[in-house]
Image: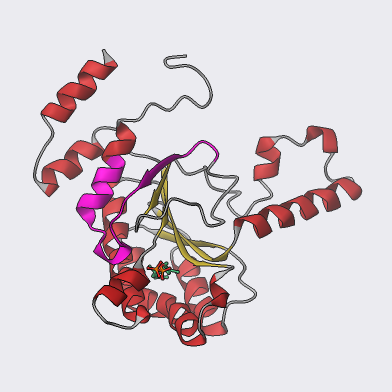
């Protein structure tokens, strides 16, 4: 029956962007989408432009996808904006990437405040330049009362480091008697991660044709649906995002169980 309904839905799929948005909204959207925004450099190279031009174009896409995610009623959008490994890139590129949150939030924050979006961050704040941190902290503060979409930037984030830090914290709490080792289960361990207050992603999108996780949310993605596209992040549009959500809506999630169980 469910399959017949899906076939019917596919055959009668709406065609305009507006119709697609309305249709997707009525079909149950993922609560949390995580995105590995990849391909900025290649996008720029194809146009004989400097790599940073790709990052700048990528920032504009963040704006458009945030608006759409908010409109669709998605609970959280986690964006991998800078990994703990990205410091290995040339200084001019790192400096540029570290300036993007300021530029983005400098112009977009009033709209985020107004549109009920709450800005959050996961990652190691200590190593961020003061100007980057200031922009992020201000956005977190100014949007803290908002109850709509959580726009979660993964900035200077690395999943293995996050897990090791969580393990160290667990050991410390066991030693000091705050935690009984026998009571440590998956839920308790999750509370030691940077995403402690968030549900795990339902859908992971990675652009640019790369099929890997690149040290992103390794624990949190255990049961997440993956969706990969060859589209480079700066070319990633509303249609692509909808396609990913539509694909998600046609998946059967079983969490290790059997269909319908
Ligand atoms: C990976 O593409 C992308 C990044 C390391 C940076 C992503 C950042 C943005 C999209 C802008 C973020 C915006 C805000 C507001 C923080 P790549 O450079 O590795 O691409 P390549 O694989 O083609 O070289």
Asked if residue 148 is among those painted magenta in the image, a careful observer would answer: no
**Tally of numbered tags:** 0
The residue furthest bottom is 92
Can you give x and y, in whole percent of width and height, for residue 108 in the image?
A: 32, 72
Most foreground residue, 6 or 187: 6
* Image position of 261 with respect to 131: above or below: above
Relative to residue 174, is residue 159 drawn left or right?
A: left
* Image position of 37 with respect to 19: above or below: below
Which residue range is magenta in the image?
222-245
* Image position of 65 with respect to 12: above or below: below
Can you give x and y, in whole percent of width and height, for residue 186 in the image?
A: 67, 36
Residue drawn 35% across the image and 55% down it:
209
Residue drawn 23% across the image and 34% down it:
26
> Could you say which quadrant of the image residue 234 lies in?
bottom left
Most foreground residue, 14 or 44: 44
Can you give x and y, in whole percent of width and height, for residue 189 in the image?
A: 70, 43
* Image position of 31 with respect to 131: above or below: above
Relative to residue 34, is residue 185 drawn left or right?
A: right
Can you give x and y, in whole percent of width and height, for residue 109 in the image?
A: 36, 71
Dividing the image into 4 quarters, which one contains the N terminus?
A: top left
| Residue 245 visible, this angle | yes
| Residue 109 visible, this angle | no
Residue drawn 48% across the image and 84% down it:
95
Judged from the image, the quadrant occupied by ligand 1 is bottom left
Relative to residue 173, is residue 119 drawn left or right?
A: left
Check the image and tell me how it is coloured. secondary structure
Asked if residue 237 is among those painted magenta in the image, a careful observer would answer: yes
Residue drawn 26% across the image and 18% down it:
3
> Could you say which quadrant of the image residue 39 lies in?
bottom left
């Amino acid at each position: 029956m469910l399959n017949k309904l899906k076939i019917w839905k596919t055959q009668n799929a709406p065609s305009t962007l507006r119709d697609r948005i309305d249709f997707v909204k009525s079909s149950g959207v993922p609560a949390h989408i995580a995105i590995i925004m990849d391909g900025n450099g290649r996008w720029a190279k194809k146009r004989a432009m400097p790599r940073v031009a790709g990052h700048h174009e990528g920032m504009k896409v963040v704006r458009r996808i945030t608006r759409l995610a908010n409109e669709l009623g998605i609970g959280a959008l986690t964006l991998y904006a800078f990994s703990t490994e990205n410091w290995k890139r040339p200084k001019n590129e790192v400096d540029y990437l570290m300036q993007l949150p300021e530029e983005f939030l400098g112009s977009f924050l009033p709209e985020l405040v107004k549109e009920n979006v709450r800005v959050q961050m996961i990652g190691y704040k200590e190593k961020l330049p003061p100007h980057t941190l200031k922009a992020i902290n201000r956005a977190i503060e100014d949007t803290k009362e908002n109850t709509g979409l959580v726009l979660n930037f993964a900035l200077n984030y690395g999943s293995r480091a996050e897990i090791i830090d969580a393990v160290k914290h667990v050991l410390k709490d066991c030693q000091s008697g705050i935690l009984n080792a026998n009571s440590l289960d998956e839920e308790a361990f999750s509370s030691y991660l940077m995403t402690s207050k968030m549900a795990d992603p339902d859908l992971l999108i990675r652009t640019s044709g790369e099929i890997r996780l690149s040290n992103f949310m390794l624990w949190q993605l255990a049961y997440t649906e993956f969706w990969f596209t060859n589209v480079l992040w700066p070319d990633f549009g509303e249609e692509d995002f909808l396609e990913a959500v539509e694909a998600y809506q046609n998946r059967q999630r079983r969490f290790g169980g059997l269909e319908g169980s």
